[in-house]
Amino acid sequence: MSQEIEKPDTAQPPVVEQSPTAEEVSERFTSLYSGFQQNDSWMKGERPLLAHYTSVETLEKILKNEELWLSNPLFMNDLDEMRFGLTRGKAFFDQTDLEKACRLNSATAAQLRAAFNTYYSEYESKHALNVYVLCLSMHAADDTDGILSMWRAYANNGSGAAVVFDTGAIKIIMEDSPLVLTPVRYASTTDRLQWLERKVADWCAIVAQAEIPQPMLYIPAYWLFNVILGFALSTKHIGFLEEHEWRLIYMPDRDKEQVLADKFDYIVGSRGVEPKLKLKIAPLDGAIPQFSFSEILHSILLGPSISSPLASASVVRMLEKLNKKDLIPKVHSSTIPLRHAWPI
């Protein structure tokens, strides 16, 4: 009797699907940032002239100390704009039926909500006070007059000055810098609400298809919160369009090495004590690449209400006393015929 030969097992072993890495999960949400990336003029290489309209007293401090003071948005006129983005974005998230919109079970939905609320509350309690902004206005190279509405609103009704910076002096883009320079996007209230609602819906669609492991549910929550935060810090009502604003923003959560933590300061003014970030106009390791003060300072404009030869000569004297004679050719007086209105 012949012995039957056992055939080898040719069946394929079961395929064990590997869980995605945190980086792979994160990559699925980068499309949420596409709107910012497509409009990111700075990252595309645009280096505009940017004017900071201010008082003559502040001009003297900028020149004397070679320093800019960034303000916290919670103490600025743009407070409502920032709150608008954050509160409305969170409201859309809170109102979303995650179980239905994202096709999640109740436990997963609850975990996502908790992660998002943690990021939101941590920002309010830890980071909000340490976010700082410097507001600037896009400036044409041949413009020595400035913008009338900017003189009226931000430079003592024309009695102030504008310091114009040449961002072309910054040759290197540092993507991981805690300082972000970005143009402001303008839209109506309706359009901004629709944008936020659409982003939350897009986020839900990604979550529904991603099959994210439970230990990584913090990643989609992180992305959604930061998209809403970016929107809040870089958008304004369409009524401010003529300002052509750019913003230099300090993001404390990105300052992992605490490069600028020792620059936190304060001033005491008419509104009480206000936090400030006092930023030297100079290279800073980990945040600002090489440039010189004279390179980045393009021009100094004197407001139309103080544009007399005497005022110009006085600024020249100030520059001489501050040992900045090289800046004298950069001083210009606005010729806009704006004068203080006399009371009737």
Image: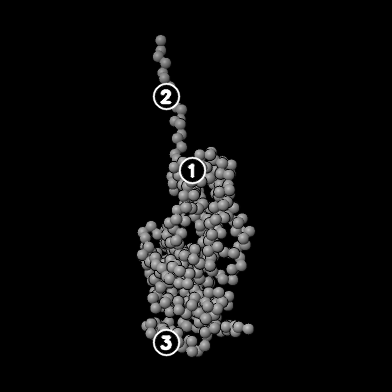
Point 61% across, 67% down: residue: 239
Going from N to C along the chain, the mark reached first, 3 or 2, is: 2
Determine which of the numbered discs, if any, sits on residue 313 in the image. none
Q: Residues within 10 Å of mark 2 (few under 14, many from 20)?
A: few
162 lies above or below 228: below
Q: Secondary structure at mark 3?
A: helix
The amino acid at mark 3 is Arg
Tell me whether circle 3 and circle 2 mark residues in contact (CB < 8 Å): no
Task: Name the spot of residue 175 as percent of width and height, x first.
Answer: 43, 60
Q: Which residue is mark 2?
A: 8
Amino acid at pointer 2: Pro
The percent coordinates of residue 6 (x first, y second) are 41, 19
Q: Residues within 10 Å of mark 3 (few under 14, many from 20)?
A: some
Using the image, tell me which numbered label, if any, was put on residue 111: 1
Q: Nearer the viewer, mark 1 or mark 2?
A: 1
Q: Earlier in the sequence, mark 1 or mark 3?
A: 1
At 45% from the left edge and 69% from the top edge, which residue is drawn?
A: 272
